[in-house]
Image: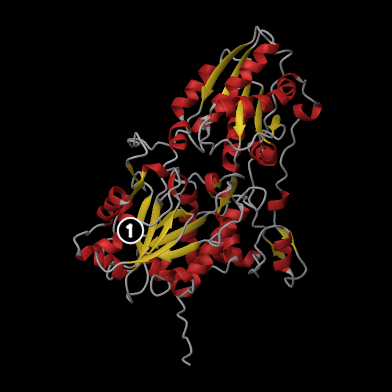
Amino acid sequence: MKIYSPWAQVDCSEPVVLNPRLDTLSGKTIGLYAHFKGHSPVMLQILSELLAERFPDTKFKAIQLKRDTKEAFNIPEFDAELKEWLKDVDGVITAYGDAGSCCMFHAYNTVYIEKLGKPAVMLCKEDLLGVGKKAATTRLCPHLRFVTTPIFDLTWVPELDEGVREGIIRPNLRNVLDNIVDGLCRPLTHEEKTPFVKDNSFADSFEVDSLENISDLFYANGWTTGLPINPPTEEAVKEMMRGTDLPADYVVAKIPPMMGKATVEKIAVNAVMAGCKPTYMPVLIAAVKAIVDPKIALEGWTCSVASWCPVITVSGKVAAQIGVGSGCASLSQYQKANAAISRAYAYIIQNISGVRPGTEDMAEVGHEGRMGITIADQPSDINPFVDPVHVDFGLDKDDSAVTMFWAQERYEGHGGNAPSCFKSMFRAAYGGWDRGCCYVMSPGFARNLIRSGYTTRKEILRYVQQYARHSAANVNFRWMHDNNHIPEGVLIPLTKDESAPLFWTTDHMMIVVSGSNYDATCINFAGGGEHGGPACVKIELPADWDELLKDYPVIQPEYHIY
């Protein structure tokens, strides 16, 4: 019988051919392209000094992209500056691939320089060469040239003092100088002149004689985490697509890093595998749209050493209609909708985004929430804040929506009045960036804040942002300044003797009301920050939604009394 692959197709029509190499660096103008971290231009400056010793008549020009996890062409003002900068540059050296997502985005931008007509070579750490090559391949440049160096990660070095510059950077760069010159000057091979075209056959449907070992087959292909799956047969996938009026081949998004095409059909395949109902499809489609929202720099989490946990909040009438739990133990995923939507989303990240352990996901130990968490914001008739959470993001009260947040930490606290509630909400580790937090608070916790005069979510978050403080001695000033991580409009303390906000802004903060009325609990999902949203997307329903709800009613378990 016919089985659908959950793996996404990718565009592969325009492979990037490397530009012809230089005959020599002598007399040329070499561009030095740095990423956002402060040590990158320092490394390139030292490199230019070393090259100048060998090629005294060579000129150098420098430029730095001061934005984290961004592709140059997506920043119009920098893109224009880059193109102007490249006009009188003969070749480019880019640095430095020194962390998972940093290396990935630096490779993206080095490929872009090749696409703009200049030969380039990229420096990266030895242990991240695979990450860089994979990133270049996803941008259809499989033969991008790299030079590796054993330099350790300089991100957290307190200062780039003389000892670091002369004792670490200069000797390591001197050791690879020949390789850098070779990368810019060695003539292209036949293979480099004729890059391969990606094979999309892994994404095709196929025939099987039996469904008996289908779960093991999918696991062996890297499409699941090994749990039993529902087979994505032609009939099952077709029925799943009843959850939307969009055509099967409609591309909802192209999800990085693989830039896999999240067609309606591919979303449906992964939903079938996870045990979803067709009524869950509108939620999954909205969640896929949210994953590529600019507020979520996806590879900043999924392709980094950081651990991560996607939190999917469903708000509005759709949540109750399809049975997304918002009552007792809502975070524990007892409800089918909660569990199946989370699992389907995890498969989408694995099979359409293309994130697998050790190749894209570089997390050292990972996260127990990797498979995701789906919850519902409590209905308006019992929610102490009355309006659903999506109203805070500009949608109408009567809409239904998905709000995505990518978390890293989890803290649990309680509060009987405003001071104790806020004390619980202040709990989060400082990370050197605008960390943000998704607060999942029980109705009782929310009511205790409201009774004390804090009647809106925005007002509560403003209080937390202003008064959750710590010693400025905890702030990594070099990270904030040198690595261009000062949020717009934020003033950084001048000395370590002052206090500093734990959260620099409220831009990456949200509140969801979910849980039972037993007491007053708040869970702090901190850590999403600049890469984590929130991103809110309206849920679009098919024309026959009411009929679909009748065909797939919510099942409420009847637990046995003992």
Q: Mark 1 = which residue?
A: 389
Residue displayed at 70% across by 26% down: 18
- In the rendered view, would you say 368 is above or below 94? below
Pick whichever, 266 or 535, lies toward us.
Answer: 535
Percent across and percent down for residue 167 are 63, 27
Percent across and percent down for residue 340 are 53, 67
Splitting the image into 4 quarters, where does residue 4 fall?
bottom right
Splitting the image into 4 quarters, where does residue 378 fall?
bottom left
- In the rendered view, would you say 399 is above or below 118? below
Residue 174 seen anywhere in this rendered image of the structure: yes
Left-right relation of 538 to 198: left
- In the rendered view, would you say 252 is above or below 4? above
Q: Amino acid under label 1?
A: Val
Left-right relation of 35 to 530: right
Residue displayed at 51% across by 68% down: 339
Residue displayed at 46% across by 49% down: 532
